[in-house]
Image (cartoon, rainbow, N blue to C red):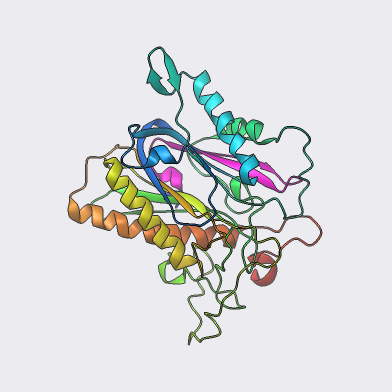
């Protein structure tokens, strides 16, 4: 176990990172189509092919997910991932044609100081293809990489995080997230994480929560000028689930966001969580499924803490300081 999304067999992750641009793309690729759904609880979402994830819609499986910077411009990234999948003959069969199914969510990172003067066409389609080609099993980087490259929060630099867990009966579940929130992942003005109660093995510092918690700790802290926001991610399990069960898993992923970021799901966030089940293991009974739902929340919260803890500040004037810059010692 690597405490990463790739602990799920048949799941690969690849990044494309452009530090000068201050943005990037992360591709989550399934070796076989995975039953999938998703949900949007933020008030300002940006996505591609998210409507088909509704349990009432016909297509039930996806080939990949994409998490990208770039705001609406970043939606080109899914086209790059589609191109890579199509070249390998992947996709939903429509007669002799195959259409790769690649839902995507984006974060708003256009005002973080990176060079966004890319000319007529955005670079995100090419970055999507690069992320697809980089997708692999095993370890992958966290922090200021891929879709988390230019992420920020109300208090410290955001980033890309991941975490995994195993149920009592051996189902694996994992989360991946880009933390670019309007709210704060850290408590008050200090180094503690709201996700601390769910932390395992000191994975983001082992500091716990401040004691006692006070009214000042829970006072509103949101981004100032620019209001560049949104937390996006996915929870994936190796269990066999229905599309409706995957939808429920995505909602519990949002619970994880709400436990790790204060406040979450605001009108200028676009908080989106995908969910997928690879079916490598059989269907869970109700007790197993309830545990998967519980772990969807706690694992997402842990992934958020890990992403912020691992992030580095962008090398641009006025860049937001990272957690490591302020408290790494």
Residue sitting at x 50%, y 87%: 214
The number of numbered discs placed on residues in the rendered structure image is 0
- Whether residue 242 sits left or right of residue 204 in the image: it is left
The quarter of the rendered structure image containing the C terminus is bottom right
Image: 291 above or below 184: above
Q: Specify the farthest residue to the top.
A: 96
Q: Is residue 168 visible?
A: no
Pick the front one: 113 or 174: 113
- The percent position of residue 45, horizontal first and vertical second, equals 53, 50
Q: Specify the farthest residue to the right.
A: 317
Pick the front one: 282 or 168: 282
Image: 155 above or below 142: below
Residue sitting at x 63%, y 32%: 125
- The percent position of residue 144, horizontal first and vertical second, equals 64, 52
Residue sitting at x 57%, y 76%: 220
- The percent position of residue 169, horizontal first and vertical second, equals 23, 52
- Whether residue 175 sits left or right of residue 216 in the image: it is left
**The magenta stretch spans residue 10:** yes
Image: 188 above or below 16: below
**The magenta stretch spans residue 148:** no
- The percent position of residue 97, horizontal first and vertical second, equals 44, 15
Q: Is residue 26 visible?
A: yes
Residue sitting at x 32%, y 42%: 55
Which residues, given as a range, are shown in magenta?
5-27
């Amino acid at each position: 176990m690597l405490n990463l999304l790739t602990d799920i067999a048949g799941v690969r992750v690849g990044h494309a990172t452009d530090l000068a641009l201050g943005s990037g793309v992360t591709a989550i690729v399934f070796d076989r189509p995975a039953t999938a759904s998703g949900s949007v609880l933020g008030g300002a979402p940006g996505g591609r092919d998210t409507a088909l994830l509704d349990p009432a819609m016909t297509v039930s499986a996806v080939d990949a997910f994409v998490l990208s910077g770039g705001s609406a411009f970043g939606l080109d990234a899914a086209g790059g991932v589609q191109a890579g999948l199509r070249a390998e003959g992947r996709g939903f069969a429509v007669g002799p044609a195959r259409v790769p199914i690649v839902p995507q969510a984006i974060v708003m990172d256009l005002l973080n100081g990176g060079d966004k003067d890319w000319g007529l066409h955005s670079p995100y389609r090419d970055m999507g293809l690069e992320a697809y080609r980089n997708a692999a099993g095993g370890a992958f980087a966290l922090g200021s990489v891929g879709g988390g490259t230019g992420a920020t929060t109300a208090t410290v630099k955001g980033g890309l995080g991941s975490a995994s867990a195993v149920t009592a009966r051996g189902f694996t579940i994992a989360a991946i997230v880009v933390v670019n929130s309007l709210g704060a992942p850290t408590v008050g003005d200090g180094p503690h994480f709201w996700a601390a109660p769910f932390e395992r093995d000191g994975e983001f510092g082992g500091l716990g929560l401040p004691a006692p918690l006070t009214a000042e700790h829970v006072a509103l802290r949101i981004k100032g000028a620019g209001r560049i926001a949104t937390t996006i991610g996915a929870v994936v399990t190796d269990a066999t689930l229905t599309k409706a069960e995957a939808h429920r898993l995505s909602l519990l992923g949002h619970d994880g966001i709400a436990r790790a970021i204060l406040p979450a799901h605001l009108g200028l966030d676009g908080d989106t969580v995908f969910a997928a089940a690879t079916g490598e293991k059989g269907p869970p009974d109700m007790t197993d499924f309830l545990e998967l739902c519980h772990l969807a929340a706690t694992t997402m919260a842990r992934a958020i803490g890990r992403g912020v803890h691992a992030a580095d500040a962008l090398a641009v004037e006025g860049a937001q300081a990272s957690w490591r810059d302020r408290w790494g010692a």
